Amino acid sequence: MKILVVNAGSSSLKYQLIDMDTEGVIAKGNVERIGIKGSVLKAKGNGHEKVFEQDMPDHKVAIELVLHALTDSEIGVIKSMEEIGAVGHRVVASGEYFKKPTLVDDEVLKTLEKTFELGPLHNPAAATGVKACIEVMPHTPMVLVFDTSFHQTMPPKAYMFGIKYEDYKEYSVRKYGAHGTSHKYVSQEAAKYLGKKPEQLKIVTCHLGNGSSITAVDGGKCVDTSMGFTPLDGVLMGTRSGCIDASAVEFLARKKGLNAADMVKYLNKECGVLGISGVSSDFRDLIAGAEGGNERCRLALDMFNYQTKKFVGSYAAAMGGLDCIVFTAGIGENTPQVREGVCEGLEFLGVELDKEANAGKNTGAIRDISAKDSKVKILVVPTNEELAIARETLALV
């Protein structure tokens, strides 16, 4: 079966067509500037790349163009849309409405609208993408795959905040986490690599990128994760502050003359390692700066490594042990200095890093970077959220 994976943004749409017999990507592309002048689709397929420039006033037109590209005489990989067995849609926030990937029907679409206030930047766009696909492919099954689904196994003691219980029930304010599709995928891939069943392992997965989250996976299930009600919580990130005292937020807002919405924007867009370093949100720039003697770049890196290490240690305590640490995503897969900084000081847990293996090139395959006598395995596992979404979709159809 061929499955189309769609990740719709407010003015963009990324896609991959995956042949589930081989789990190989046979076509992919990215639509930019939907509803904005200068709309463009950059598509790859059949060993070629092609750019389509035309007005795309809405997501329906964008989906129609994607399907045209998939059947194009030059870069097409299918003869008709009937060859697409199902469509998997990435959705950021599920709230407490969806506990697992869900097959779309009219009732599901209505319920999805209730999640918009939890993911105002992403969920309305995802719903628009789903509706556009239904219009163009009315007989093809559609599946919603949520970033938060994997975290739905957290117990109340892990996901509850210390607010009035009545307010939790009324407003559903609790920890939801993010990057769940990635955390589930890499933890399962790590178990396969180690020749174990997920149920046999206690794993901490570190999805480290411009947005970063750490998750405790005990017996194949998430028991805690670092991001909270939104992806703003947890470790400091590229431009996000991470954990901060709520009273400090009120104090800063008053001093800077910002309202609540502007303060949240400030914490999301102007803080993190960018705000600390004053240089960049890109870790390559921070490393170059630190090596050149920039103390603020060094501080930003030290803070990131320290905070990530704290989550690893606390999750080992929460699970009552640790068998494996997984590093994934852009920084986790490609930045040995961060991996070393996170593992340094965890020797008391049985974590011993092989510095030579850690410094090796990213091959695109799973790498074991733990020392021979390390009691805890340290793995670099490339994430593949699109394949994970396709697998979840296939399981439902």
Image (tube, rainbow, N blue to C red):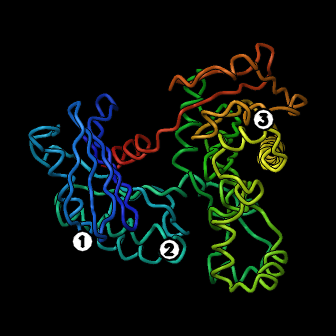
Res 120 label: 2
Residue at 55% across, 58% down? 148
150 sits to left or right of 247: left
Q: Earlier in the sequence, mark 1 or mark 2?
A: 1
In the image, 285 versus 238, the foreground residue is 285
- Residue beneath disc 1: 57
Kind of residue at badge 1: Pro
Q: What is the CA distance from the residue labelled 3 to the residue labelled 1? A: 47 Å
Q: In the rendering, at what x and y percent does residue 312 appear?
A: 78, 42
Kind of residue at badge 2: Pro
Kind of residue at badge 3: Glu
Q: In the rendering, at what x and y percent does residue 211 appear?
A: 61, 53
Q: Are marks 2 and 3 in contact (CB under 8 Å)?
A: no
Residue at 15% across, 43% down? 83
383 sits to left or right of 164: left
Q: Earlier in the sequence, mark 3 or mark 1?
A: 1
Number of on-image labels? 3
Residue at 77% across, 31% down? 340
* Furthest-top residue in this view: 372
Select label 1 or label 2 by which is in front. Answer: 1
Residue 104 vertical placement versus 383 (above, below): below
Q: Provide the secondary structure element on which disc 1 rests.
A: loop
Residue at 12% across, 44% down? 72
In the image, 223 versus 36, the foreground residue is 36
- Residue beneath disc 3: 291
94 sits to left or right of 358: left
Q: Provide the secondary structure element on which disc 3 rests.
A: helix
* Furthest-right residue in this view: 348
